[in-house]
Amino acid sequence: MKYISTRGQAPALNFEQVLLTGLAPDGGLYVPESLPQFSQEEIASWAGLDYTDLAYKIIKPFVGDCISGDELKTIIDDTYVDFRHPSVAPLVQLDKNEWVMELFQGPTLAFKDFALQLLGRLLDYVLERRHQKVVIMGATSGDTGSAAIQGCKRCSNIDIFILHPYHRVSEVQRRQMTTVLEQNIHNIAVQGNFDDCQSMVKASFNNQGFLPEDRQLVAVNSINWARIMAQIVYYFYAALALGGPMRPVAFSVPTGNFGDIYAGYLASKMGLPIDQLVVATNTNDILHRCISSNDFTKHPLVHTLSPSMDIVVSSNFERLLFDCYGRDGEAVNELMTRFQTEDVKLSEEAFSNVRKLFDSYTVSEQETVQTIAKVYDDTEYLLDPHSAIGVQAARSVRRSSGIPMITLATAHPAKFPDAVMQAGYPHKPDLPHHMSDLFMLEERYEVIDNDIGLVHDFMVNNLSA
Ligand SMILES: *Cc1c(COP(=O)(O)O)cnc(C)c1O
């Protein structure tokens, strides 16, 4: 399997190379040159498979011969061992033909564990073989940092440095990062805001001269292809559990960077009958404006009750646009270059291609809280604010009530106690049992001034031998 850039001007890579790369050198994102195709008979034959056996069927063609079948199977089996539920991704029914799939059973209680647990293991395997060490550097306002740390804490070939804004992440989120005391994990609390952290990471990727010659930075944000790949699996898993592929299903996905729902689009292109994909956004609604009225313009960032969806630009949307522009890298390059500086619209043809499978809806802060309250009143099921946005969007724009609608529940409600209590829940939701000691554990982090030179000094002084 070869991977090509959405802007058409970068060399093609194999799986191992794409794993170790972030953006393509032409500024684009990597996508498979062609997708694996599964027939209805083949998909039907997977009914009843365990999550990890199904994951192997779907992931194997993307990896090609970069990793042997046996090794890949071992890596995948190991990846999902730490998930608390035997089903890995359990389905819960809210109403007739209305379901949520709980993607928060992993170690950090958010869906990002599905991809980052796998990414850490794939990287370590490949690096060991290459006798190479790399440095992961990332900025986080919450979920990504802890999922990356948990995914990489046992990787002897990776040093990981996660920057968070000092005093500006929630205590649960900070402790999920800072109580991981493995030697290769380094949390940096920057005396600045999230944008300061993100700018430092960007600048570091653009100029890696501060690192020793034998080290490079690896990206763990959702532009990394392997993250998308891991997320395709649960779309098949949910559909098979609800009568697919004989019966089509629909999904609603709480969306920020468009990584999660893009994986659903790929599942459909690979042969899974999907009737509709609902892009659910909070007040940061560039995707909703684009999909509903072809208004693809940037608005300023708004802080909401669903912070993991607070974005100005959804980077993975470019991967969908590449297909909707007939895989014309030049057209995508032209559009994305203009998008930097002016208000743009998609071409009529691209716009109508997007709307074939996708609908969208934006959920206000008030509606988010009301949805948590209403679902809890009706069913005693407690949604986190991100998942509530998914449920409300599904209810607002679903095309057919006869087709199962599955909302991806992306986080556990205990991660977002404020929103849940605003909805009238009487106390902070309990953390799952295995995390109940989170507030007693020792923390380790370094507070550093908002100065990239000092951050680089700290990193270089703390690299493993
Ligand atoms: C990251 C995240 C999202 C958004 O996912 P994207 O792939 O960026 O669209 C939604 N909900 C939660 C809880 C998240 O952590």
Image (tube, rainbow, N blue to C red):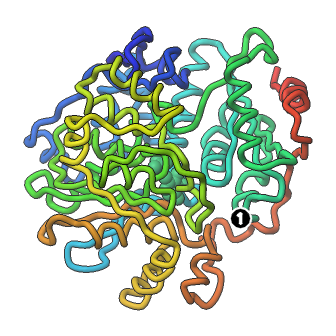
What percent of the width, then of the height, locates residue 96? Answer: 20, 78
Position of residue 399 in the picture relative to residue 90 (left or right): left
Observer able to see residue 105: no
As helix, strand or loop, the secondary structure at mark 1 comes to helix
Position of residue 422 in the picture relative to residue 158 (left or right): left
The quarter holding residue 74 reads top left
Observer able to see residue 178: yes
**Residue farthest front in this picture:** 342
Q: Which residue appears at 72% of the width and 48% of the height?
A: 194
Q: Which residue appears at 25% of the width and 33% of the height?
A: 324
Q: Amino acid at mark 1?
A: Val
Q: Which residue appears at 45% of the width and 77% of the height?
A: 367
Q: Which residue is mark 1?
A: 172
Q: Nearer the viewer, residue 324 or 216?
A: 324
Specify the quadrant that holds the C terminus. Answer: top right
What percent of the width, then of the height, locates residue 41? Answer: 8, 41
Q: Which residue appears at 18% of the width and 45% of the height?
A: 272
| Number of disc labels | 1
Q: Looking at the picture, does residue 172 appear above or below residue 21?
A: below
Q: Nearer the viewer, residue 14 or 205?
A: 205
What percent of the width, then of the height, locates residue 299? Answer: 53, 50
Specify the quadrant that holds the N terminus. Answer: top left
What percent of the width, then of the height, locates residue 47? Answer: 18, 52
Q: Looking at the picture, does residue 304 appear above or below residue 371?
A: above
Q: Is mark 1 within 8 Å of ligand 1?
A: no
Circle 1 crowding by C-alpha within 10 Å: few under 14, some 14–19, many from 20: some
Position of residue 425 in the picture relative to residue 31 (left or right): right
Position of residue 13 in the picture relative to residue 145 (left or right): left
Q: Nearer the viewer, residue 136 or 206?
A: 206
